[in-house]
Image (cartoon, helix red, strand yellow):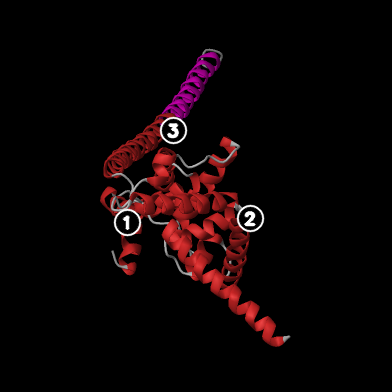
Amino acid sequence: MKRMAKRVFKDTSHDISEFESRLESALKPVRPPDEFVRDLRQKLLSQMEEGQRGKKLSTKNLYLLILTGMLSVVLVVATALRLIVSLLLGIKLFSRIRSSRDKKQTGPST
Amino acid sequence: MPEQNEEAILSQAAQGDGDAFGALYERYVGRIYNYIYYRTGNASDAEDLTARVFYRAMRHIGNYRDRGLPLSAWLYRIAHNLVANWHRDNSRRKEIPLEDSMQGHFTGSHPETDLLQWEERDRLLRVIYKLSAERQQLLILKFVEHLSNAEIGQIMGRSEGAVKSLYHRTLLALRDEYENL
């Protein structure tokens, strides 16, 4: 029984190695056409270059955006400061007018 | 391109260096084309899908990290996914056109011997195309690309032992199918 199993295994492995050599000769590597390889390389590299250019441009845009944002903040702060100063000056002027009017009203009666 | 060098070239390519990507392309284009050619069975689809593999690789090379998976395995996986989509879109497997399948296999010395050889090759390919996608992939990587079981395992996401066992089962199934044809 053991001997028979051994023989069957031997036959199978022989068949398989024979089949492997058949596969070896059937599945031969093929060469892609040179023109295709060259053209694809060129297309890939030009697209990569374009992508890099686009990336550089978008970095430039980002810096421009940050700069504009910072300028806007400075402008808003300056306007707010100007408003506060104007308000303070207005209040001061108003109180001065008021005190001088009070002085005028109390002056002749004494 | 030595293996240590590939890492440096890869990081240059990831930073957008065209020459570095070109070097990687030159190294792998033939292998990827071969794989796709045998999976689709025709040259024009092989060209189209090979181009798609490299366009996809170019777009995502910045995200590629070597997590124990070599670049070749990553490219084969992209190719495998694209071929799977191609098969799904075509719904039926294409037959290998005669002129494609005979290309480069005629020696021209003995036409009768050549024809017999071609017939046997054609029969074998027909049987191979009946196998599952996974088994076809294994045979192509083994016989066309001459990769080791460990390398095939990395591409297929299986252990070396699992690849060995799948290979043995595939050969037995193929032999039986071939004899019944």
Reply above or below: B101 against A79: below
Left or right? Give the position of B32 relative to B26. right
- Residue visible at 59% across and 68% down? B168
Task: Say which of marks 3 and 2 sits in front.
Answer: 2
B149 vs A22, nearest the viewer: A22
Left or right? Give the position of B45 relative to B85. left
Magenta span dominant secondary structure: helix
- Label 2 crowd (10 A; few <14 / some 14-19 / many >=20): few
Q: How far apart are marks 3 and 1 (CA)?
A: 59 Å
Residue placed under numbered mark 1 in the picture = B27
Residue placed under numbered mark 3 in the picture = A77
Task: Say which of marks 2 and 1 sits in front.
Answer: 2
Q: Distance between the residues labelled 3 and 2?
A: 87 Å
Q: What kind of residue is marked 1?
A: Arg
- Label 1 crowd (10 A; few <14 / some 14-19 / many >=20): few
The residues colored magenta run A78-106
Task: Say which of marks 3 and 1 sits in front.
Answer: 1
Q: Residue furthest right?
A: A1
Q: What kind of residue is marked 2?
A: Asn
Q: Quadrant of residue A40?
A: top left
Name the quadrant of the C terminus of chain A: top right
Q: Is mark 1 on a helix, strand or loop?
A: helix
Q: Earlier in the sequence, mark 2 or mark 1?
A: 1
Q: Distance between the residues labelled 2 and 1?
A: 40 Å
B75 vs A61, nearest the viewer: B75
Left or right? Give the position of A70 relative to B84. left
Q: x%, y% of residue B8?
A: 32, 62
